[in-house]
Image (tube, rainbow, N blue to C red):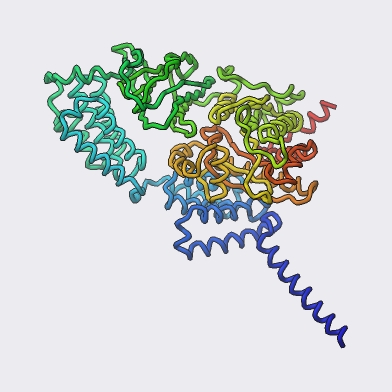
Amino acid sequence: MQQRANKSLSSTIIRLLTLTLLTHMAMVWPAWAMTPKEQYYRAEKAYAALKKNVRHQKYRDRWLACIEKYQNVYRLDPSGPWAAAGLYKSGILYLELHRRSFLDADQKEAVDAFQRVIQRYPKSRYTPKSRSQLADLDKPAARPRKPGTARHLKKAHAEYNQLMANAEKQKYRDQWENCVDRFQTAYRSDASGPDAAESLYMIGLLFKGLSDKSHREADLDQAMEYFRRVKAEFPGSAFADKADAELAGNGSGTAAAIDAPDPLASIISQNQEDQEADMPDSPLQPAGLVTVQGLRFWSNPSYTRIVIDADQETRFSHRLLKKDPAIKKPQRLYIDLSKSRLGRDIQKFVPINDELLSDARAGQYTGESVRIVVDIKSFKTYKIFSLKNPFRIVLDVWGEDTDRQAVGPSTSPAQPSTGRLPPGAIARQLALGVSRIVIDPGHGGKDYGAPGYLKGVHEKDVVLQIAKRLARKVETELNCDAVLTRTTDRYLTLEERTAIANTQNADLFISIHTNAVRDKRAYGIETFFLNLATDEDAIRVAARENATSAKNISDLETILNDLMQNAKISESSRLAAMVQQEMYLHLKNNFSHIRSKGVKQAPFYVLLGAQMPALLVETSFISNPRECKRLTSAEYQEELCDGIIRGIRKYIKETSPTAYFYQPAERDKNG
């Protein structure tokens, strides 16, 4: 009896343990272990739960998690019957997210998903649905004011009223320009919203008022240009009529008539455009000012990055000026740094002489402000943003799209590739659409990166070894040109790394790092792409790699709203997913205790401004005893690189299906 009872008890315990194990596996089972159909219904269930929970709908990460589930349906079997459905539903959710975030990047993700459905699955029942969604997006539609726009406009009007009430302030050009900046901020916060016409009209009114004081024709031209924009962009608005009246000369200005003599004109004229760029340092500069320490640039014929270095954070403004043939001035862009002075040893004139820019000049604009003037030959668009620790301002200028084969040599220091391309590589590159990959070993020189668990091990050394191995495999296995941002133990700023990728016309950018936390038990691999951070862990990693604080990461997300308009977010996301999956599966087959921490997104400095799909790979935890030992071994580094190569190859195959049509012929040719 006792034996039967023990046997029954053992059977009960085994059943309970089995049930617990199965329940746990269901919770953590990776997406790629499911069938596409199972993954689709998993995504549908998550979406249904999200629609029922109004509180969760306020959080971006909830939407992105649901979108990821639909995208996994496609990734599991891109040629299967469920792929189109997964892509289409991911587009629908991105549209829903766009209606809440007002980010153009979210709408672009939706458009990308619908276009891929149409191109890849022309016979699918989701193709007409995708066309319908795209057609609806093309229709002009009134929409509510974006959050924050009203606040920006209110602040702008408050500053305008103060300026109009203070005759002393009206003597100084920078007071008018500060007010203009306020309205420009309001306009940029919602350029197609209900307040945009008013913001543009007020900018025109301010330039007209400034021209009344300065008697400068260029200021009046600016005013008329803004009035014309109001008429052209918002023809049905009340401000279009006001702008028309100003253009016709019937509107009321903000000051005296343009042809009336004004004794203040000579005062404002002393602060003209860029005359100050040639002025010597003021001998009476107040103490406590920010010091502008230098100008750096990287360039090729279609892209230029200029960086302004300062020793502290300060406010800055910028403005694009039209060409002025009357005084033989080219089109130029200036950046004003407030409460600043020029450093003693700064190079005030920096010749650039590429296809886009002539030069950059630095000058003491007033006793407490510095102006940087960039003379322009031609350009398509530009972006300006700032980074912290140390503070610097980054100007990216792009020209018209240039074919790589027509692009001349970069004027930035080009990094050598690791060797010669194999025979026939050029032919294959034409099929691939990916011919050059820039690999960035993080840190270097005085920046040691994260310390290893083992004594004497540093992140900067480990990632350089991994990067060199990866570069060799890129050239020998993918037949692509590999360019390293550094090949020795030298220091590079984060913005310089992206500049190298852009000036080298890279098709992909991969930054290699190792992870680290205080908890020595933490382990695993993860891959990041540039986007708004969705969890505290991503913010922590970005803060460490950016050498800044978590608070600065939150501040940086405001910059991303503008920068992400042209970022390759969709492509970067797909590349990151494939690299992470292949890296995990390959390592799992060769080592024990391999953990995938998944694909995440965060605002990394090193990825800002990249004009190609870009990702950052946290290869393993250098703070973990087992993974630190592995990271220093040649075997682990080789297998790690093999996994990354598999992910890149998978991405190339999906984005360019003809990529490997050339392989058999070349293999035969090469023996």
Near-viewer residue (460 or 558): 460
- Up-down relation of residue 514 to residue 461 (above or below): below
Near-viewer residue (540 or 452): 452
- Say which quarter of the image contains residue 7: bottom right
Near-viewer residue (76 or 120): 76
Q: Quadrant of the N terminus?
A: bottom right
Write the residue at 34% across / 47% down: 148
* Left or right for 254, reference 295: left
- Say if residue 147 shows up in the picture: yes
Near-viewer residue (151 or 51): 151
- Say which quarter of the image contains residue 232: top left
Q: In which quarter of the image is the C terminus?
A: top right
Write the residue at 25% across / 17% down: 270
Q: Position of residue 11 (x, y in %)?
A: 81, 77
- Up-down relation of residue 281 to residue 496 (above or below): above
Q: Where is residue 306 in the image (x, y as percent from the top left)?
A: 47, 23
Q: Where is residue 169 in the image (x, y as percent from the top left)?
A: 20, 29
Q: Where is residue 39 in the image (x, y as percent from the top left)?
A: 64, 59
- Say which quarter of the image contains residue 259: top left
* Left or right for 60, reference 441: left
- Say if residue 399 shows up in the picture: no
Number of numbered tags placed on the structure image: 0
